[in-house]
Image (spheres, rainbow, N blue to C red):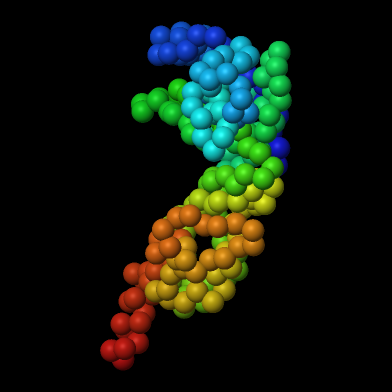
Amino acid sequence: MNTYQLEATPRDVAGKKAAKAIRKEGLIPAILYGQAPVETPYPGVLNPGEKIVAIENNKGIVVTDLVVTNEDVRNLIYTPSIYLIELTLKGGKTVKAIIKDIQFHPVTDAVLHIDFLEVFEGKPIVMEVPVVLEGHAEGVRSGGKLNLEMRKLRVKALYSQIPEKLVINVDTLGLGKVIKVGELQYDHLELVNAKNAVVCSVKLTRAARGVIEAAASA
């Protein structure tokens, strides 16, 4: 994955009213989910904006309330690419993270909230990776149309093993045939979508169907 540099400002005040005030300033409220050693006081506050909210697998689950700017995250959000984020907290540390979730306004599509997830060297993560088709499908040469049904697939792997895209070769994909998630394999990662989900297909077009029917009746 490519790396994206992003700065965020920790905030001490959380809640709906605080988030609404942040948006009025043209900024975006955000949260970073991270970890701390279990011996860290729990519940408790660590650094500005940080609080431990649970204990899981002998680690404290740390939530850090943040603020980011629309300008800083625009190229991170509105792109088909995926990124490993080097997230620098002003006055604090720098962590590696990915986007866990984004909330958009249902009418304006404005970004309302972003959840970031801190990643670690030896801990697998799950994230969506774009699908790219390559080759010339056999079914297309026979008059069919190639359709990409799933533009992204969810993968589970160490962040260092996650590719920028998942390439699928469709050269042998015949007319009326499909490729399902369960038929795909990639080194060092696991696809977590339903195995029977259709990723791409070659469907018979109306024009091709007419040609076939005409040939059959000749």
Residue at the spot x=47%, y=77% of the render?
Answer: 174
Relative placement, left or right, of 35 versus 175 is right
Screen quadrant of the N terminus: top right
Residue at the spot x=53%, y=20% of the render?
Answer: 42
Residue at the spot x=64%, y=58% of the render?
Answer: 188
Query: Quadrant of residue 94 in the image?
Result: top right
Screen quadrant of the C terminus: bottom left
How many numbered marks appear? 0
- Residue reaching furthest left? 217
Percent coordinates x, y for residue 106 in the rendering? 36, 28
Percent coordinates x, y for residue 45 in the rendering? 57, 14
Residue at the spot x=54%, y=45% of the render?
Answer: 127
Relative placement, left or right, of 214 versus 183 is left
| Closer-to-camera residue (102/191) | 191
| Closer-to-camera residue (28/194) | 194
Percent coordinates x, y for residue 167 in the rendering? 60, 60
| Closer-to-camera residue (163/144) | 163
Percent coordinates x, y for residue 125 in the rendering? 57, 44
Residue 210 vertical placement versus 95 (above, below): below
Residue 58 vertical placement versus 217 (above, below): above
- Residue reaching furthest bottom? 218
Look at the image and tell me whether residue 216 can be seen.
yes
Query: Quadrant of residue 171 in the image?
Result: bottom right
Look at the image and tell me whether residue 51 can be seen.
no
